[in-house]
Image (cartoon, rainbow, N blue to C red):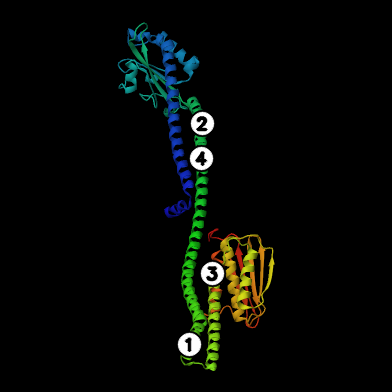
Amino acid sequence: MIATVQTWLDRLSVAQRFMLGSLAILALGMAGIGTWVTRQIEDGVVHRTAATTALYVDSLIAPSLQDLATGDTLSAESIDRLNWLLEDTPLGQEVALFQVWDQAGRIVYSNAPSMAGQAFPIGSDLAIALAGGISTDIGQAEGGGTLPDDVSGRDLIEIYSPVRSPGTSDVIAAAEFYYATSELERDLAAAKSRSWLAVGVATLGIYLLLATFIQRVSNTVRGQQRALGEQVVWLTEVLRQNQVLHKRVQGAAARTAALNERFLRRFSAELHDGPAQDVSLALLRLDHVAALCGTRGDDAAATERIERELELIQSSLARALNEVRGIASGLMLPHLGTLDVAKTLDHVIRGHRRRTGSPVEVELKNLPEDAPLATKIALYRIVQEALTNAWRHADRAGQKVFVSGHGDGIVVEVNDVGPGFDPSLSDGSEAQLGLVGMRERAESLGGQFRIESAPGQGTKVIVSLPLEPSGGSDA
């Protein structure tokens, strides 16, 4: 049972537990206050009855007991007057038992005839009355007097009031009254009902106000917890994205190092296989020319051979110079800051045509007037690399560049009708190196990159670049 209650309590929210505890505390407080108010009502009614009785004794009963000031018995006339007061007056008819005690503790008069003349030990309440005070209580009659059959000893209000001699404060006797409490109980019940109702309504009002306040506080706390939970979820997602970006940055750094190394090897190979070979050939021919010059004399044939060798040396050096210039122009970007998008594309395509002598079909549509420098650099390098790959691996067949503007971005397509390849296979070739570089450029700006190709179906490079890179204008 206790475990079940504990489980039920554990399922309650903090606000519900607080409301349950406050309800219990308010109920206990209501019970305590109601009991105290009821007791105060009872005491007030009893004391009011005692005061009324004391006035009744002083005004009506005391004159009939003056015989006790000079003697220890009452005259027949005094007894008749007392009987009349107790039997024929409205207040006397409410008295269930009336007795008069003298200073010695003897009953000198009683409306229960069997009690008259008997002496009993003086109790505390009687002693108070004989000393001049008023004592009230609810209980049975002292001395065991005979009571009416329809009145129980428990239903009596017991009042002791002093009887004084006229003109003095001397107490000559004590009057003992017992009132039936039936009427009083009805009054008390009505007063208790009203008091309990008032206490209950006040307690209920306090509880409702407290419940409303706690509910509002609880709603506020739940709203804050919900907002905090959403923030935690958002921060968790941001952290996850940061971790993904961190891994991508690490991967990009590693790939960049590899790309740089491959690029340097490629650049070295181009210098070695191109200009270096031509320069080497020129040096060898110069040695041959020097030897011919030493043995030429006036031989016309030797002079002709020397001239042919010099022409060969000149052409080799010219080819080396052109190749060095081509490599240098490929490494160095033109000043793109003052060029718009169309002129940037025209510059890179004309340069490709000039270097390779191959035709390139161009189609431009809805281009923006200008774009951030980072976007123009990426556009230039991607088109340059895609055309170079088409020239090298597709035998310059069907090269086409289509660029269009779409809202806040630019879409680039570079096509060829060469042999194609499987994009999922990476062989570490220069073509794959160029594809990785183009992808890195596009994604670093927040763009997208994809390849559409298959063996025998040509190749299409599709790139979308934003007009506002994710890294800002300085990306």
Whole-number angstrom distance, CA of label 2 to CA of label 3: 95 Å
Which residue in the structure is indicated by mark 4?
213
Discs 2/1, front: 1
The residue nearer to you, when weighing 281 against 288, is 288
Q: Say which element carries label 3.
A: loop
Closest to the observer: 29 or 421? 421
Q: Assess disc 3: are there few (<14), some (14-19) or many (≥20) residues with their C-alpha within 10 Å of its C-alpha.
A: few
Q: Nearer the viewer, residue 189 or 211?
A: 211
Disc 1 element: helix
* Residue named by callout 2: 198
Front of the two marks 2 and 3: 3
Between residue 474 and residue 283, name the one nearer to us: 283
> Looking at the image, is mark 4 or mark 1 earlier in the sequence?
4
At label 1, the amino acid type is Leu
Whole-percent x, y for residue 349 in the image: 63, 71
How far apart are labels 1 and 3 at the CA level? 32 Å
Quick check: 273 above or below 410? below
Picture layout, residue 13 above or below residue 363: above
Q: Is any part of residue 118 visible from this angle?
A: no
Q: Residue 284 carries which label?
A: 1
- Taking the image as shown, residue 103 lies to the left or right of residue 405, namely left
Q: Mark 3 points at which residue?
A: 332
Q: How crowded is mark 2: few (under 14 residues within 10 Å), some or many (20 or more)?
A: few
Question: At which x and y percent is residue 218?
Answer: 50, 45
Q: Is the residue marked by circle 1 packed among few (<14), some (14-19), or many (20+) residues within 10 Å? A: few
Say which residue appears at 65% left-offset and 75% top-offset. 415
Count neighbours of disc 4 (C-alpha within 10 A) and say few if under 14, some if 14 to 19, many if 20 or more.
few
Residue found at the very far top of the displayed protein: 167
Q: Which residue is drawn at 54% across and 94% down?
A: 301
Image side of residue 210 versus residue 113, left or right:
right
